[in-house]
Amino acid sequence: MIHKITRKEDINPDDYLIEVVAPQVAERFQPGHFAVLITVPNGERIPMSIQKAEDGKITMFIKRLGKTSRELDTFKVGDLLESVIGPMGNPPEIKKYGNVVFASDLVCGHAENYSMCKELREIDGNHVISMQTFPSSKDVYPEEELCRDVCDEYYLTTLDGSRGIKGHYREILKDMLDKGKVDMIFAGGDIPGLRELAKLTKPYHIPTIVTVRQIMVDATGMCGSCRVFVDGEMKLTCIDGPMFDAHKLNFEDIISRLAMFKEKEAMAMEHYKKGVE
Amino acid sequence: MAKINKVRIPMREQSCEKRIKNFDSVPLGYSEEEAMAEAKRCIQCKDPICEKNCPVRMKIKAMIREIAKGNFKNAFFIAKEDNPIPAIAGRVCPQEDQCEGACIMGKTGDAINIGKLGAFIADWAMKNGVTEEFHIKEKDKKVAVIGSGPAGISCAVDLRKFGYQVTLFEALHIAGGVLQYGIPAFRLPKDIVDYELSYLKKIGVDVKLNNIVGQNIKFSELRNEFDGIFLGTGAGAPRFLNIEGEKLKGLYSANEFLIRVNLMKAYKFPEYDTPIVCGDRVGVIGAGNVAMDSARCAIRLGAKEVYILYRRTKEYSPARDEEIQHAIEEGVIFKELVNPVRFIGNEDGWVTGVELVKMKLGEPDKSGRPRPMKIEGTEFILELDTIVNALGTKPNRLFLDKTPELETASWGGIKVDENLMTNIKGVTAGGDAISGGATVILALGEGRQAAASIHKYLSNSNENG
Ligand SMILES: Cc1cc2nc3c(=O)[nH]c(=O)nc-3n(C[C@H](O)[C@H](O)[C@H](O)COP(=O)(O)OP(=O)(O)OC[C@H]3O[C@@H](n4cnc5c(N)ncnc54)[C@H](O)[C@@H]3O)c2cc1C
Ligand SMILES: Cc1cc2nc3c(=O)[nH]c(=O)nc-3n(C[C@H](O)[C@H](O)[C@H](O)COP(=O)(O)OP(=O)(O)OC[C@H]3O[C@@H](n4cnc5c(N)ncnc54)[C@H](O)[C@@H]3O)c2cc1C
Ligand code: SF4
Ligand code: SF4
Ligand code: FES
């Protein structure tokens, strides 16, 4: 399979968008699925949320973080990825939830926000509310990549108030919860932020499903690297998730395990920089 | 008649000091002269009991006879008749329990080194570009083989030889199953696995990587598209102990540890991108081949002390003799009669040790080995910074969860009849997927048996087929 890049754009100073040919993934995609990329022959297998799947192509938002994401940023339209595998994961049911929120404050969350809202809105009886938070106006994605057009009610916030409403989506959500307006919450993004969200929504007893990022190797349930604990029970993010009940997740463990390879990741980055220079 | 030589022609090996710093093959292989000399030790028994103890009934006697005469090409063809991957089996079979364990020469001296002779002859053919020649009479029926481990490989080869159009689906980005991701290169060099896989393509098997049946391609689609199916999906999901501390950083399943090291080549990090963190003091729980492989990888990753933590004693270890011996030579320390109670970590969430309880051996259990029993009040702590859990594997539920129509056995594996047919007509299964974890050669034998079964099924379903 030839995985050619057909579109690549900066969407804010940290994140870029990449569209790549992957017919098998695109054809079978459901919101909540992710893809596994191998960008170069000696590369690692990295999971990436999918924003859109159309015409045999998938679109992803990627944050420049470590070696792989930065190296991929040097790829241009027309370049090929080694492998694009998927769709992976066990997506949540798309059904009637009533007043349903999708909230996001980070790259991968924004991708899922888009795909989930778009599908949820197709279901009669759903009122889809999308919320997106960015640090500042310069970080806000281009209008056409925001979720404004795929939902019924839209909120854009920036932490410094330079665009949209000032603050985090949690504040708007709290308001809505107080007014009893919400039946179901989905969210994705910063993990400590999702822990805060879980704390916020729990007293209201509103079901809250969040996307977990955990370090993956195979993403097929073979290794256990992506294990998380739901009500004390071990689950695998790759095949049981990546979306789980936020009220049952042990976030401390997730955050701790995400840091397991920090030193090595820094080494990989150093090694890569040296090679580029 | 020449005097019988009771002593094996020794296998040259990389020295211990050298090999613990690399992932290259430990045995260096026989030269032609050495192989012939070893083959000449075989007394060519009238009733070669070695063959009866080979799960695929290799014609060992004839192969050895030809090696002794220097007719390597003939020897290779003979080996290939029953075993499509002699280079691999020769390196990883538990020969002491199989062919060599039965060899008559072993009664009064050293058994013939049948495994290494098999590997020699296959390596010789690879080096000299000798391959089997056969004519495929094409049939228009299509068979799907799922999983590219030894079971899938052997099934695909035989089905192709019968003339079927064979598509092999593999979940990972590299084919080979355990041969690729589990067994390290110092035991099974990857160029050998690659060679066998390139042979598959050469005979016309369509190998589709990154295809996870049940996940990104539906089983029902395959059932519609193909006339027969073989399930060689292995038993690749890790088992955890469900004890305190399994969330800790620095604690791996053997699968994760070995996949990072072997499949993703973390031992070449940062030339390869996938990292591994391996500390100075490593504890490996279990004592089978998987545990030995993990321990020997840890040594090569630079660990200073590597422990095998086993609830029985060494002599009951299910690992191959050669592996145990190599592990000990390389400095792996056996801590016998201990069982983990919980894993201990620090406030940063890193593992710092394991609490173990001492065990004693009781009456034999179902496996015939003495049952290990806890000695109450003997708990103690062993400080470690990396722990690898090598307590066996189970079938991957990714596939089974999505195929409720497929009947499974009570232990979770796929259920088959004596012809390796599942409850679904035309769908066969073999290898670890039906046994839960056996050997390369048993998986291979079942792959072949399933191919024959599919052939029979398809021949009957259409008289002109
Ligand atoms: C289901 C899922 C969906 C994801 N979707 C997106 C997305 O849409 N956009 C995006 O930018 N990122 C996404 N990620 C995270 C992405 O996989 C990592 O950012 C990427 O692997 C980092 O690689 P790197 O070499 O650039 O950085 P590294 O230097 O390797 O890692 C930087 C940090 O990223 C995290 N990380 C590293 N490897 C992984 C991994 N295999 N899985 C998860 N986290 C990892 C760790 O916390 C690490 O400290 C997703 C992760 C998961 C599990
Ligand atoms: C570390 C280790 C060391 C071992 N050492 C030895 C040894 O020295 N000697 C010995 O005889 N045996 C050894 N074994 C056991 C032996 O390797 C196995 O018994 C044998 O590989 C089983 O073969 P298989 O073909 O059934 O499955 P596997 O080799 O497990 O192959 C199964 C394949 O199916 C693929 N797959 C799974 N699900 C799907 C799906 N849904 N869609 C597509 N593909 C899928 C997997 O990715 C995998 O590639 C060892 C095992 C391990 C793990
Ligand atoms: S296949 Fe295995 S058991 Fe059979 S002869 Fe070869 S090494 Fe021995
Ligand atoms: S049993 Fe031993 S000596 Fe006899 S034929 Fe087999 S390998 Fe040769
Ligand atoms: S990534 Fe290996 S089990 Fe999930």
Image (cartoon, coloured by chain):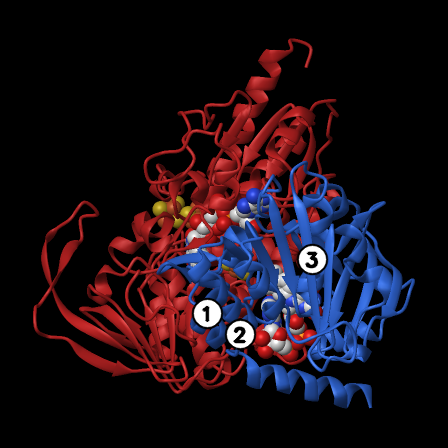
Chain colours: A blue, B red
**Depth check, front residue: A169 or B302:** A169
Q: Do discs 1 and 2 belong to a common subunit?
A: yes
Between marks 3 and 2, how big is the CA–CA gap?
A: 20 Å
Q: Is the shortest distance between ligand 1 and the CB of mark 2 under 8 Å?
A: no
Marks 1 & 2, CB-CB < 8 Å contact: yes
Q: Is residue B161 visible?
A: yes
The answer to which of marks 1 and 2 sits earlier in the sequence is 2
Q: Is residue B136 left or right of residue B24?
A: right
Marks 3 & 2, CB-CB < 8 Å contact: no
Residue A73, compared with residue B230, is above or below; it is below
The answer to which of marks 1 and 3 sits earlier in the sequence is 3
Which residue carries the number 2 mark?
A192
**Depth check, front residue: B337 or A169:** A169
Q: Amino acid at mark 2?
A: Pro
Residue B245, compared with residue B60, is above or below; it is below
Which mark is drawn over residue A130? Answer: 3
Which mark is drawn over residue A176? Answer: none
Image quadrant where residue B212 sits: top right
Marks 1 & 3, CB-CB < 8 Å contact: no
Between marks 1 and 3, how big is the CA–CA gap?
A: 24 Å
**Depth check, front residue: B101 or A77:** A77
**Residue B142 x, y percent position in the rendering:** 69, 27
Q: Can you name the residue that lies furthest to the top here?
A: B463
What residue do we see at 83% from left, 46% from top? A56
Q: Is the shortest distance between ligand 1 and the CB of mark 3 under 8 Å?
A: no
**Residue A96 x, y percent position in the rendering:** 60, 39
Which chain is indicated by disc 2? A
Q: Is residue B313 left or right of residue B327?
A: left
Count of labels in the image? 3
